[in-house]
Image (cartoon, rainbow, N blue to C red):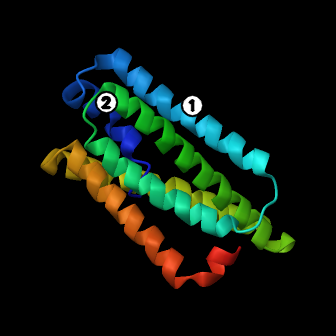
Amino acid sequence: IFGWQYQILMPIFAKDILNVGPIGLGYLLTAAGIGSLVGALLVAALGDFRRKGFLMLVMAMVFGVLLIVFAVSPGFYPSLLILVVVGGTSATYAALVNTLVQTIVPNEFRGRVMGFYMLAFSGMLPLGNLQAGAIASTLGAPASLIIGGTVVVIFSLSVLIFVPRLRQL
């Protein structure tokens, strides 16, 4: 709900904050896409490894921190570099979540659990878009990303600290 909405706010950053227009918007989204591809390939290259849960939570925290950094980025080129890593961390996180859900759930429940997972995932994104847009219209797009990134960091850190079983997966 609080993290992936940076893409919804990207046109505001391209037009009003970074002053790069539609072509710059394309570059910004491409940078995040390149990072996502690299992150997904990295997870695939790692294969089956221990402590996926720990890496997943670290990626979520880094993702949140980078959203904050992007929100206060001084210019277009630093923003491109930040977005490459934002895309990489978000794809790595998403791939690890999906992997963990599918490997932990018993075979007889996997279809139902994945259906619920996709429903929850798809159903929550529009709510995140609503909150990001509401905050952006009131406080501005950078504030919306700072708030969203902060929530992601706090939540991920809390899970990392208070759910030791997930760290061990």
Q: Quadrant of residue 75?
A: top left
Please tell me how crowded label 2 is: few (under 14), some (14-19), or many (20+) other residues with Cα within 10 Å: many
Relative to 119, is 36 above or below? above
- Residue extending furthest toward the right: 107
Pointer 1 residue: 34
Look at the image and tell me in which quarter the N terminus lies: bottom left
| Residue denoted by label 2 | 11
Q: Is residue 81 above or below residue 123?
A: above
Q: Quadrant of the C terminus?
A: bottom right
Q: Earlier in the sequence, mark 2 or mark 1?
A: 2
145 and 121: which is toward the camera: 145
Callout 2: helix, strand or loop? helix
Amino acid type at mark 2: Pro
Is residue 84 placed above or below 153 in the rendered structure?
Answer: above
Q: x and y percent of residue 96 in the render?
A: 66, 58
Residue at (38%, 70%) from the top-left corner?
154
User: Label 1 neighbourhood size at 10 Å, few (<14), some (14-19), many (20+)?
Assistant: some
Frontmost residue, 127 versus 87: 87
User: In the image, residue 129 lies at what x, y percent?
Assistant: 36, 49
Considering every residue shown, the one lying at the far top of the view is: 23
